[in-house]
Image (cartoon, rainbow, N blue to C red):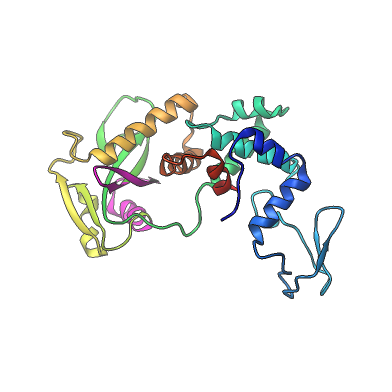
């Protein structure tokens, strides 16, 4: 298993300059040692620009190619400081806070950097939820006049899937959907939950086809309107999500970028029991 710094002092001892950051990335990317992606030869030397020059075919390979750090104009040490700051904040980080901590001259630079980190928080091919999973929807957005419930306007609908773990909540998935129709709900559920799992929902018609898709549906509430809390896991996640958005971002989250915030919250929630901030840093790197 790759090593990671345990404290902020150890972090700054490890990553004193860009060369140290590149070396760390290289150990993570090539744990068995570098091999040229073209010819597979291990023999190489490192250029002044930090590229690995293959002695077999002459190919130059960058350790940051195809990663979050590719083609960046910021020093790698700044990126690493940003990674440490974001993962060490238990409740999340804001672009303004990141700008102040890193001493960046532009709020926009901090905002772009933070959003790139949020996009990296979702691992491609991640495991789907399984076992007993509660599913419900929640609206994100401030109070608006007019119709309430699933037909409300001016808000964003998010599907909450919460896996049961004993008497508590295990992993979660959050997915923004266009509406509460089966056409929107079913793809969100199949992407988040393993087939064969028991999916607990209310009796909303949008979930009526889950058995056909290969799930074991259990109806936990007889009414489509929000009433008694018979889906406590999903509803608690929805409540915590809204509190986090309000507390960390003062509720100022646009619908355009909501997916990134959902990814960040999922990353943090699913790793809430981690005893080491350094391990979260490693996971995000």
Q: Position of residue 231 (x, y in %)?
A: 22, 41
In-image side of 113 versus 201 (left or right): right
Q: Position of residue 161 (x, y in %)?
A: 32, 47
In-image side of 166 versus 17 (left or right): left
In-image side of 187 versus 196 (left or right): right
Q: Position of residue 122 (x, y in %)?
A: 50, 50
> On screen, 153 above or below 70?
above
Q: Residue at x 87, y 53 (%)?
A: 48
Q: Position of residue 266 (x, y in %)?
A: 43, 43
In-image side of 16 versus 137 (left or right): right
Q: Is residue 137 magenta?
A: no
Along the viewing direction, whichever of 63 and 159 lies nearer the viewer = 63
Q: Is residue 181 magenta?
A: yes
Q: Residue at x 50, y 53 (%)?
A: 123
Q: In the rendered view of the protein, which quadrant contains the N terminus?
A: bottom right
Identify the magenta region: 162-191
Along the viewing direction, whichever of 63 and 186 lies nearer the viewer = 63
- Residue 47 occupies quadrant: bottom right
Along the viewing direction, whichever of 101 and 255 lies nearer the viewer = 101
Q: How many marks?
A: 0
Which residue is most to the right?
48
Using the rendered image of the protein, determine whether residue 70 is visible from the camera's viewpoint: no
């Amino acid at each position: 298993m790759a090593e990671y710094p345990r404290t902020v002092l150890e972090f700054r001892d490890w990553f004193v300059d860009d060369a140290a950051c590149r070396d760390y990335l290289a150990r993570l990317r090539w744990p068995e040692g570098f091999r040229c992606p073209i010819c597979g030869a291990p023999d190489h030397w490192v250029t002044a620009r930090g590229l690995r020059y293959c002695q077999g075919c002459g190919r130059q390979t960058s350790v940051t190619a195809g990663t979050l750090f590719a083609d960046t104009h910021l020093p790698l040490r700044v990126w690493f400081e940003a990674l440490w700051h974001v993962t060490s904040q238990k409740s999340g980080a804001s672009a303004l806070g990141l700008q102040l901590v890193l001493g960046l001259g532009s709020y926009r630079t901090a905002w772009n950097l933070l959003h790139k980190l949020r996009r990296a928080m979702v691992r491609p091919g991640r495991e789907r939820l399984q076992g007993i999973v509660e599913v419900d929807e929640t609206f994100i957005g401030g109070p608006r006049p007019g119709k309430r419930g699933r037909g409300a306007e001016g808000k964003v609908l998010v599907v909450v899937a919460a896996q049961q773990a004993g008497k508590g909540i295990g992993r979660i998935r959050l997915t923004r959907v266009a509406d509460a129709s089966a056409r929107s709900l079913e793809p969100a559920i199949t992407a988040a939950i393993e087939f064969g799992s028991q999916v607990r929902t209310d009796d909303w018609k949008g979930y009526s086809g889950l058995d056909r898709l290969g799930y074991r549906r259990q109806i936990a509430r007889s009414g489509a309107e929000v009433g008694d809390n018979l889906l406590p896991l999903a509803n608690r996640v929805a409540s915590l999500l809204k509190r986090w958005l309000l507390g960390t971002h003062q509720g100022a989250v646009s619908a355009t970028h909501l997916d990134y915030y959902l990814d960040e919250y999922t990353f943090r929630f699913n790793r809430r029991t981690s005893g080491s901030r350094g391990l979260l840093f490693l996971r995000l790197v």
